[in-house]
Amino acid sequence: MNLLDSITGFIADTGIPEQLSEVEVVGLFTNPWFLVPFLVFIGYQLYRQSLNTLVLVALLIGLWAFSGTPLMEDLIIDGELQLGKLLPVIGVGLGAAAIAIYFFFIRSD
């Protein structure tokens, strides 16, 4: 547990969760320093026909976009979890897990 505590402490000290929550999506995808390597990566994966990697990248971008929706912002109000909004979040998580399991364990390239 000491290793896990030091890792979570490091992440909390560096402010990574706050930095990720404050990313400007339009600015990120119009910045050539991000966009050019990202498009080269996507093009290379298309060339290799690596569908599993492309699906994983699309899934991560989709989950990141979902985490910024008003549904996720209103999930915890005044320190209390809103149970009425929990079911869609669980559904999205289960759907993402099902897609990942299908592409990495059931379907093979």
Image (cartoon, rainbow, N blue to C red):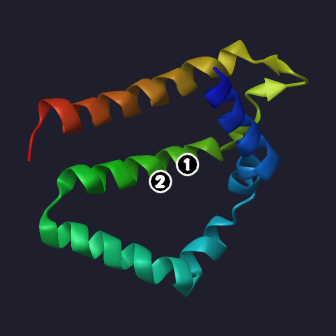
Give how far across and how far down residue 99 sits, in percent: 29, 35
Three-letter amino acid code at the position of disc 2: Ile
Q: Residues within 10 Å of mark 1 (few under 14, many from 20)?
A: few
Residue occupying image coordinates x 39% and y 34% = 96
Q: Residues within 10 Å of mark 2 (few under 14, many from 20)?
A: few
SS under mark 1? helix
Q: Is the C-beta separation of discs 2 and 1 under 8 Å?
A: yes
Left-right relation of 79 to 58: right
Give how far across and how far down residue 44 sits, in percent: 23, 73
Residue 73 found in image quarter: top right
Three-letter amino acid code at the position of disc 1: Trp
**Dividing the image into 4 quarters, which one contains the N terminus?**
top right
Would residue 71 be visible to someone looking at this image?
no
Residue occupying image coordinates x 22% and y 49% = 52
SS under mark 2? helix
Give how far across and how far down residue 17 sits, in percent: 72, 46
Residue 97 found in image quarter: top left
Question: Which residue does the numbered mark 2 point to in the structure image?
Answer: 61
In the rendered view, tell whether residue 27 sits above or below residue 49.
Answer: below
Residue occupying image coordinates x 42% and y 79% = 37
Left-right relation of 108 to 15: left
Q: Compare residues 21 and 82 and report the one nearer the observer.
A: 21
